[in-house]
Amino acid sequence: MSFLSGKKALITGIASKRSIAYGIAQSMAREGAELALTYQNEKLKPRVENIAEQLGSNICIELDVALEENIDDAFSNLSSHWENLDILIHSIAHAPSEELKGSYIDSVSRDGFNMAHEISSYSFVALAKKAWPMMNANGALLTLTYLGSVKSVPNYNVMGPAKASLEANVRFLAADLGPHSIRVNAISAGPIKTLAAAGVSGMRGLLKHVESMTPLRRNVTIEDVGNAAAFLCSDLASGITGEVLYVDGGYHNLGMTLNID
C-alpha cells in the first residue's frame, strides 16, 4: 500500500510543471493521496486544471492569498468537495522583482518589505487558520523556505526576512496545533530553476555555483523536494513537527565554498 493512501491533500502554488508544488503533487499522487489544487487567477486556471486532470484530480479552486475574502471562498469551495482534510501544502511567495537584485539596503522599500511578508509568510498563517478546523488527526501542514532565511544570499534580499518570518510561523503553528494532532513543518529547498526563481537576479550563476560546491555535486530537483514532502506529510513522519528539513544536497552544511588547491 502507498503511504499516503486515503489522505486528502490541498496543494497551493502550482504555476507550471516546473513548480516545486508540481513536484510535490506528483509525489503525493504517486503515493495514493487524493489531491485538490489551487490557481491564483483566471490566466493560470486552464494550465492548473490540465495538471489536475493529469494527476487524477477534478478539484481546482481559485486562491489569491492577497485577498482575505478569496481565502474564505476557497475553503468554502473546498468544503463542498471534502468534509475533511489531511494535508495542506503552502508553496506561495512573492516580492517585487526590482527588490531582488543589487544590494539589500539599496533595493528594499517599505511597500516591498510588507508585500514579501504578507504573501510569502502571513499567507501560511491565513491558510492554516482556515484549514485546521477541517483537518483530521495526524494531519500535516507544510511550507517551502530557502537558505536565505538564515544566511545572506546575493540578490535574495527582501525575501530573506520574509522566509525567516515564515520559519518562525512554522514553530508557533506547530506549538499551537500539536495538541490537536496536527504537525507543521517546512522544507528548505536548494535553488531550482522555477518560474518564481527566475525573478531573482543572477539565478543562473547561483545554480552553477551550488552545483559545483554542494556535497552531492548537483542541484536538487522538484522530484527530490516532492519525495521529501510526501514523507513529511505521511504517518511515517508522525513524530516530526516544528522542523525545517533541508533538501539542498547538503549545501547548507558547508562552512567554506572556495576551491582550494
Image (cartoon, rainbow, N blue to C red):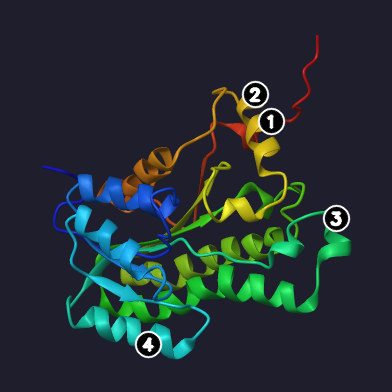
Helix, strand or loop status at disc 1? helix
- Mark 2 to mark 1 CA distance (whole Å): 5 Å
Name the image quarter holding residue 106.
Answer: bottom right
Front of the two marks 3 and 4: 3
- Mark 3 to mark 1 CA distance (whole Å): 19 Å
Q: What's under tag 1, amino acid-wise?
A: His
* Labels 3 and 4: the sequence-earlier one: 4
Q: What's under tag 3, amino acid-wise?
A: Ser
**Marks 1 and 2: in contact by CB < 8 Å?**
yes
Lateral position of residue 27 relative to residue 155, left or right: left
* Labels 2 and 4: the sequence-earlier one: 4
- Mark 1 to mark 4 CA distance (whole Å): 42 Å
| Residue 211 drawn at (x, y percent) | 61, 28
**Marks 4 and 1: in contact by CB < 8 Å?**
no
Residue assigned mark 1 = 209
* Labels 1 and 4: the sequence-earlier one: 4
Q: What's under tag 2, amino acid-wise?
A: Ser
Q: Is residue 188 visible?
A: yes
Residue assigned mark 4 = 72
